Structures are given as C-alpha cells and as structure tokens.
Amino acid sequence: MKKIELLALVDDDDTFVFITKRIIEKTDYVKEIKVFSNGLDALNYLKENLNSDYKLPDVIFLDLSMPIMDGWQFLDEFSHLESHRTEKIIIYICSSSISPHDLVKAKKMSLVSDFIIKPVTKDKFSEIVLSL
C-alpha cells in the first residue's frame, strides 16, 4: 500500500482537527499532515508550492463551512489553478452537513472524490487509503 506523503486538513473546527489528526496518525498511512483553518490559507499554500511536487498534498480533507473562504469557494478557486500537478490531488469533502443539496452538488463536481459525513473514523480512513 502506498503511503500518503502529505495530507491537508482544511477545517476551522479545532476539535475535529485534533481528533482526525489522532486517528490518521494511529494508522501510520500518512507521513505529514498540514492544517489550514480556512480555504484561503490552503489555496495560498497551494499557489506558493505549485512548482514543488513534494510540498503539494496528495489528499485534501475539505470542510464546507469555514470563515474567510468556505469549501465551495475553495473548490471554485482550485479549479482555476493551472497546473498538471493539481490534477493529482484527491479531494474529499468532510462535512457535518447532511443537506441533500450539498451532497448532490459535491457529486456533480469532478474535483471531489467523495463526500464524508463527519466524523472520520479509523475504518473510514483506512478504506479511503486502500482506494487510492
């Protein structure tokens, strides 16, 4: 199984971030986790590192509801990044939203691999890693 070099958690909920990091660390599937509390910080990081494969995340766990730039705005801006390197990034929406509208919207977006309803369990994370 391939180890994930870098996973980005884009979420402003400190409790979710803490718990999810602990779960991910216990699996030993990920070498490094970067945390961003809003979509703008994550987007700026991506833009700064577009020419550096090893600094771009392999996987992004993206919340929808955040201050400054929410998940939908992030996805819109991400889709305009012009780099073949961003095509390799796998994005999962991780949200507590159970809105059918959000689910349908996410399923229609080719950038989004799946919609995970919080919390992310160890079993769910293992399933994600095995599917990569």
Image (tube, rainbow, N blue to C red):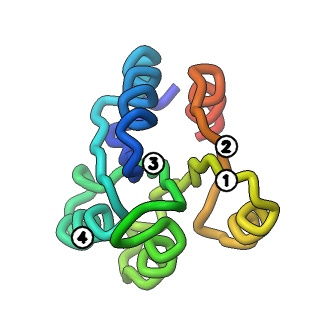
**Front position in the image: 79 or 37:** 37
- Which residue matches tag 1? 97
Marks 3 and 2 close (CB-CB < 8 Å): no
Amino acid type, mark 2: Ile
- Identity of the residue drawn at 50% across and 54% down: 63
The residue drawn where x is 69% and y is 65% is 106
* Comes first in the chain, label 3 or label 2: 3
On residue 44, the disc is 4
Callout 2 secondary element: strand
Q: Circle 4: is it few (<14), some (14-19), or many (20+) Cα within 10 Å?
A: few
Q: Say if 3 sits above or below 13 in the image.
A: above
Question: What is the CA distance from the residue labelled 4 to the residue labelled 3?
Answer: 16 Å
Indicate which disc residue 117 carries: 2
Amino acid carrying label 1: it is Ser
Query: Which x, y percent locates residue 111?
Result: 59, 67
First in sequence: mark 4 vs mark 3: 4
At x 64%, y 29%, the residue is 124
Amino acid under disc 4: Asn
How far apart are the alpha carbons under marks 1 and 3?
20 Å
Q: Position of residue 18 (x, y in %)?
A: 36, 29
Q: Are marks 1 and 2 in contact (CB under 8 Å)?
A: yes
Q: Secondary structure at mark 4?
A: helix
Mark 4 touches mark 3? (CB < 8 Å): no
